[in-house]
């Protein structure tokens, strides 16, 4: 089925029993016989999976900005954690180098 507004293919949103256009947002209610046919073909299990996927896609469409922000926050937190670990390792190496320098100066015969 094509969108009457822009001509793109409509997507099915089982959770709200309608079809929608992913480009312009036009929504069209599904006919009852189309729902019965889909239910008969797919079965209860398939319909449940489609409903869950449709709900997930709807959520992702409606909350895309928040999801992107959360991904950026997670990436930033991971980067900070890696930087902390790098600085700790560098500090430990510097500490060992200083210890080795002092040991060799205090005990010139030790190497």
Image (cartoon, rainbow, N blue to C red):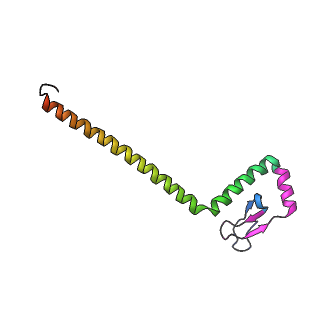
User: Is 81 left, or right, of 88 in this rendering?
Assistant: right
The quadrant in which residue 101 appears is: top left
Identified at 38% across, 43% down, the residue is 85
Q: Nearer the viewer, residue 26 or 52?
A: 52
What is the residue that sits farthest to the top in this orientation? 109
Q: Nearer the viewer, residue 105 or 52?
A: 105
Identified at 25% across, 40% down, the residue is 94
Q: Quadrant of the N terminus?
A: bottom right
User: Is 23 left, or right, of 97 in this rendering?
Assistant: right
Q: How far from the left and from the top, in percent, is residue 66?
A: 57, 61
Q: How far from the left and from the top, in percent, is residue 19?
A: 75, 64
The quadrant in which residue 62 appears is: bottom right
Q: Nearer the viewer, residue 110 or 63?
A: 110
What is the residue that sits farthest to the bottom in this orientation? 5
Identified at 77% across, 50% down, the residue is 48
Q: How far from the left and from the top, in percent, is residue 45?
A: 79, 46
Q: How many marks?
A: 0
Residue 66 sits above or below residue 24 on the image: above
In the rendered image, residue 90 lying in the magenta stretch gets the answer no
User: Is 25 left, or right, of 102 in this rendering?
Assistant: right
Residue 39 sits above or below residue 2 on the image: above
Task: Please give the range of residues in magenta.
Answer: 18-41
What is the residue that sits farthest to the front in this orientation? 106
Q: Quadrant of the C terminus?
A: top left
Identified at 42% across, 47% down, the residue is 81
């Amino acid at each position: 089925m094509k969108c009457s507004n822009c001509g793109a293919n409509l997507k099915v949103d089982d959770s709200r029993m309608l079809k929608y256009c992913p480009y312009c947002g036009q929504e069209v209610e599904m006919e009852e016989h189309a729902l019965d046919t889909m239910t008969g073909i797919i079965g209860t299990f398939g319909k449940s999976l489609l409903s869950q996927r449709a709900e997930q896609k709807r959520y992702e469409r409606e909350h895309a900005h928040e999801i992107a922000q959360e991904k950026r926050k997670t990436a930033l937190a991971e980067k900070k954690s890696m930087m902390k670990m790098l600085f700790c390792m560098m500090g430990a190496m510097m500490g060992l180098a200083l210890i080795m320098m002092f040991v060799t100066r205090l005990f010139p015969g030790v190497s």
